[in-house]
Amino acid sequence: MKQGKKRVPQYSTAGFYGIEGSPRQVFNFNPGWRFLKGDAPGAHEAQFDDRDWEAAALPHGLEILGENASGMRNYQGTAWYRKQFILPEELKGKRTVIHFEAVMGIADVWVNGQPAVRHLGGYLPFAADISHLVYSDGRENIIAVRADNSNDPTYPPGKPQDYLDFSYLGGIYRDVYLIATEQLHVTHNLLSSTVAGGGVFIGIRDVSERQADIEVRTEVENEDGANRCFTLRTVLENEDGKELLVFEEMAELKSGEKGTFVQKMDARDVRLWHPNDPYLHFIRTEVLENGNIVDSFKTRFGIRLFEMRGDEGFFVNKSYIGEKLSGVNRHQDYVYVGNALPNSGQWRDAVLLREGGSNVVRAAHYPLASAFMDACDELGLLVTVANPGWQFYNNEDPVFEQRVFEDTRAMVRRDRNRPAVLLWETALNETDDQPVSMLKEMHRIVHKEFPFPGAFTCADVDSAKEAGFDFYYHGSMQDEKCSLTREYGDGGEVDNFGSQNAMTRVKREWGELAMLNQAMIRARDLDDVYSTPPKRVGATVWCGIDHQRGYHPDPFLGGVLDLYRVPRYSYYLFKSQYAPDFKLKGIETGPMVYITHELTQVSGSDVILFTNCEEVRLTWLGQVIGTQKPEPNYTAMPHPPVVFKDVFDFHEISSNWRHRTGEIEMVAEGLINGEVVCREVKVYSEWLAGVKLEVDDVHIGLAADGSDFIPVRAVLVDHKGVPKVLGNEYIHFVVEGPGEIVDGPVPGANPMRTQFGTATAFVRATTESGEIAVKAFCNGLASDQIVIRSVKPALPLIYDPSYAEESRKAESKANAPAVAAALAVAVSGNDAEAIQKLEATIKRLQLELTSKEQDIMELRGSRA
């Protein structure tokens, strides 16, 4: 568990970072909403009575979902959000923009009863200028949002959820910001129609060892009623804010006019960004009038140049990267909260994956949250950004294709300044019937919106080659271009795509044998990954974290992290592939050894260890068993497992150590050049005695913004404090202070039954900062208590506490899908039984159809 000094991540807002004292002000618009799951005619009107609605803080996911929310158990349909707020007095006369990071499905937004914006698509941001709709004279404002995550084939992904491999989990599930600027300002990149423009766009044209040719495009707009003369100042800063270069340009804009200003920098003595040295710079943009700053903010970026050189492989800053890209696919959903993961959770996911051996993440199958991308930039975790889509193309309605193009543009606009972006996966995932003309247009859009070196379009369909894409998934070694294995490690292990059983798909609670089977299959797969030539730049395993699915009743259970973000054994296999001297700020690295053995009565005889050391010395029951090197039958992976055969025999404990069980331990020592550089000790657990609490926040603190939460693990332990993995108990969590447990009507959240000896609670902060005491109780066992301190959020909050109660009762009501509730009321007796049978038949046929589709895709993938 990660303890220690707290980290304060830097989260971007609408793609930029605010500057203290700037006329440009950014407000956290997340707290203080009211919410209704269902439709409410007239709810957009300012005077609508919403007093019986639930309180909610964003990010919000409509409902608390159980550990298994797969198979269409989640709600689909209309939901409403309303919020009352007063604009701060200093915003009077300013231009006001509302920015939504994402709303699932179709979003309609009204301000004070007037329409503000409509957006279709649940994975990309959108914004609206609401200056003409809001009151800035101290009067109350009302914003209303109707969110609809129903199936709709007219916008991507488009496929009905009950045929989809992931779930349209609903709500305003990402952040909302209120941004205020003067009338003379830098434009919002999503509100500008300028190709390869809008806001601030930083392009890297060339680099050498400590030098870079940088181009900065800045679009300034004058919405004042008079002409404005101004100076545009562009400042290159290093990571610590030191000025490296300053460019100034004088200009004039007429009323209602906007202009793009291009400034070219020959930057010297700079530090280049590399996945293993992710050094970041800033561009500070200032608009000055009569010597006074009227707009300013920072844009973070990395100075780097990516090249794909065919047989030579992937080059970073004109040098071969020197290693395979090895990582995971990632879906965004999270246990209980659905997609509504706060920024700290997004950041934790990135830290866990990077620390666990990944240097690349494939977004599956839509753009991931901005906070996750912020973390990837900082951690050197490369990302493939994907258009929303999976096995679906609507060839009957041309508006679908146009919306795919809109998504492509928005995707590039959002992430164009991010150094971590490796590939633009523009084609819809696993969709063979996309027209070549459509693929060509998506390829063209990417390069029009990103007219600098290092932009690579990619796809997993054969027609992408005909469309001229820059990069292939699963490409042949005879192809001219580089490729990446986008998914591996799962399909070949699945019995069929109906039952979907596999030795790689296991719950942690199934124990060490199940997790060890998964890990050793992954080891064989990893060896294959590393055996490929440089042209195959790497591979991403399916899937990094367990996730919910629409079409199947079971979640995907093959992740290196489970739904609670607790590692399986395979996590440490991936982690052990780092070199022992690898160092990266923000994650724990260095020599390591991990024992995949729990010393229980059901443990196996062999002891398998994952290590990045040259050899391991194993001591068991006080005797040195021996010193062994990694297994020789792995020919390519950097650090194969170490296997000690026939070491453990429980009968020896029961026969010879029954009165000395407190002395039993297994010691693994990692050696390099004959010296011990790391050590792990596993102690034999005795009788179950208590519960121990640990905060697993990877050093990221808790913000008092009403929605932030962190995981707290309750571990069953014996009287010595040794974990008892075979313990099976219910843990009840209690919170005192300005916080609460994320739970609801779904059984199993609180109290929670331990899984492999551990139960997890998510502790959420209110908008009041302070100390939160968390307690864990288990019948007949010693309890534990831990104190967490929430801190004031970085951005000021805009909300009315009297309008939406801070008690956060949004998850307290029953949240079975409305269809099921209506069915229970509307039918009875034989009719109900007949309907249930019919529904079961329909579901079975749907599953069989999806299974056949998956088999076809698997066959096509094997041919590639």
Image (spheres, rainbow, N blue to C red):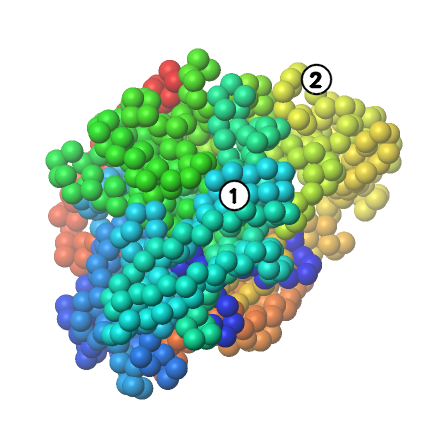
Where's the C terminus, which quadrant? top left
Helix, strand or loop at label 2? It is loop
Q: Position of residue 131 (x, y in %)?
A: 27, 73
Helix, strand or loop at label 1? It is strand
Disc on the earlier residue, 1 or 2: 1
Q: Is residue 203 visible?
A: yes
Q: Residue sitting at 34 percent across and 19 percent down?
A: 860
- Circle 2: residue type: Pro
Q: Position of residue 774 (x, y in %)?
A: 59, 67
Answer left or right for 856 relative to 280. Answer: left
Q: Position of residue 312 (x, y in %)?
A: 54, 21
Q: Residue sitting at 63 percent across and 24 percent down?
A: 637
Answer left or right for 51 relative to 719. Answer: left
In the depicted view, which residue is nearer to us: 107 or 442? 442
Inter-mark Cα distance, 1 to 2:
47 Å
- Circle 1: residue type: Asp
Q: Position of residue 702 (x, y in %)?
A: 55, 65
Q: Is residue 567 visible?
A: no
In the depicted view, which residue is nearer to us: 860 or 454? 454
Q: Residue sitting at 14 percent across and 54 percent down?
A: 827
Image: 465 above or below 575: above
Numbered tag placed on residue 213 in the rendering: 1
